[in-house]
Amino acid sequence: MSNKHNVNNLQKNYSSGSSGVQSYAYTDKKYKFYIQGIHSHWYMWSGYKIGDPILQFGMSPNRVFPKNLKDIFYNVHYLNSFSLNESKLLEVRLFYKKIRLNILLDIPQQLMSLQEY
């Protein structure tokens, strides 16, 4: 850590761990909302509007409070990527049809598994 930064002004952000090792990096807290705004803007480029249902696959089955809050605010339905077996894929398919999902977030390998199913 550079001595130019006060660790109290930094936020520790973790990767998904999809490579097999979960890594982390520090970000200045004042840029947190800027980064979230950029993500929202990127989603909107794809036709997403805040509140549209999203199906997000990820590596962390235990969601922490800020992520649960984001899931509620953005109408995110979260699924653990490692639990995608045939019955779970059927559940996803039925859920997908029921709420007419337009946005899926995941690493390409998992999206391919869903597409092939």
Image (cartoon, rainbow, N blue to C red):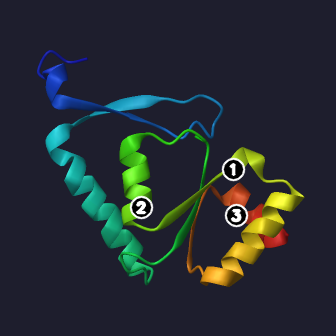
Q: Are marks 3 and 2 in contact (CB under 8 Å)?
A: no
Label 3 element class: helix
Q: Is residue 80 left or right of residue 26?
A: right
Residue at x 14%, y 43% (from the top left corner): 30
Where is residue 110? Give x, y as percent.
Answer: 71, 57
Amino acid type at image mark 2: Ile
Where is residue 71? Give x, y as percent.
Answer: 44, 58
Q: Is residue 44 above or below residue 6?
A: below
Q: Is residue 8 left or right of residue 44?
A: left
- Of 77 and 110, the residue lying toward us: 77
Q: Of tags 3 and 2, which is closer to the observer? A: 2
The quadrant in which residue 36 appears is bottom left
- Label ID, residue 42: none
Disc 3 versus disc 2: distance between alpha carbons?
A: 22 Å
Q: Are marks 3 and 1 in contact (CB under 8 Å)?
A: no
The quadrant in which residue 77 appears is bottom right
Residue at x 63%, y 37% (from the top left corner): 19
What crowding class fits label 3: few (fewer than 14 Cα within 10 Å), some (14-19), or many (20 or more)?
A: some
Q: Is residue 87 left or right of residue 11?
A: right
Disc 2 versus disc 1: distance between alpha carbons?
A: 19 Å
Amino acid type at image mark 3: Leu
For the N terminus, give its image quadrant: top left
What crowding class fits label 1: few (fewer than 14 Cα within 10 Å), some (14-19), or many (20 or more)?
A: some
Q: Of tags 3 and 1, which is closer to the observer? A: 1
For the C terminus, give its image quadrant: bottom right
Disc 3 versus disc 1: distance between alpha carbons?
A: 10 Å
Where is residue 89? Give x, y as percent.
Answer: 80, 64
- Identify the residue under disc 1: 81
Q: Is residue 12 left or right of residue 85?
A: left
- Label ID, residue 111: 3
- Of 85 and 43, the residue lying toward us: 85
- Identify the residue under disc 2: 72
